[in-house]
Image (tube, grey):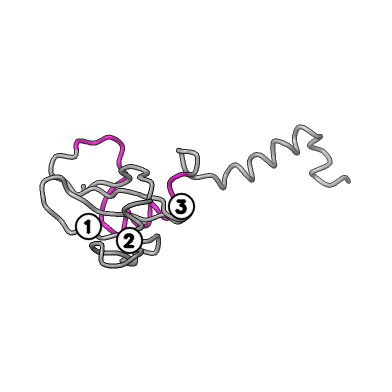
Amino acid sequence: MKPYANNLGPLGIVFLMLMIFGSCISDDDGGRIPSCTDEIIHQFEMVPFNGQDMECKFVLNAYEFRGEKYFVPTNNCIDLILVVYNCKGDQVCMLETTEFCTNFWLDSESLGIVGIQE
């Protein structure tokens, strides 16, 4: 008896490869939002942002800086001190008191809102 892969034929093998490698892609936006996004959203007790009315709810903004992803919770109705978190949920910046913080706010790229308070 032949191995199963030999019975698939060339197109079957290509299809199988696409199924295997395609299942590793989880972001709907071409990979710009980090894979840690769901974990960070959960950590902040939020849900994914899909255009919901923000009212006075807390939202979670994503940024890219020096090839890494960062998150900043904000609220349009409350003046907040902006705190930057990394993918592990660690606070990496508050205010502009360090060179990292200053450079982050000058050079980071906004990826938009990724989470919102329920």
Q: Nearer the viewer, mark 1 or mark 2?
A: 1
The quadrant in which residue 17 appears is top right
Amino acid type for the residue under numbered disc 2 = Tyr
Q: In the figure, 6 relative to 99: above or below?
A: above
Label 3 amino acid? Answer: Ser
**Whether residue 9 is situated above or below residue 23 in the rendered picture:** above
Q: Which residues are magenta?
A: 32-53
Q: Which residue is nearer to you in this view: 87 or 13?
A: 87
* Label number found at residue 35: 3
Determine which residue is flagged by label 1.
82
Residue that badge 2 annotates: 85
Q: Nearer the viewer, residue 102 or 41?
A: 102
Residue at 46% in and 44% down: 32
Residue 83's quadrant in the figure? bottom left
Mark 3 vs mark 2, foreground winner is 2
Q: Is residue 33 left or right of residue 58?
A: right
Q: SS at mark 2?
A: strand
The one of 64 and 46 positioned closer to us in this rendering = 64
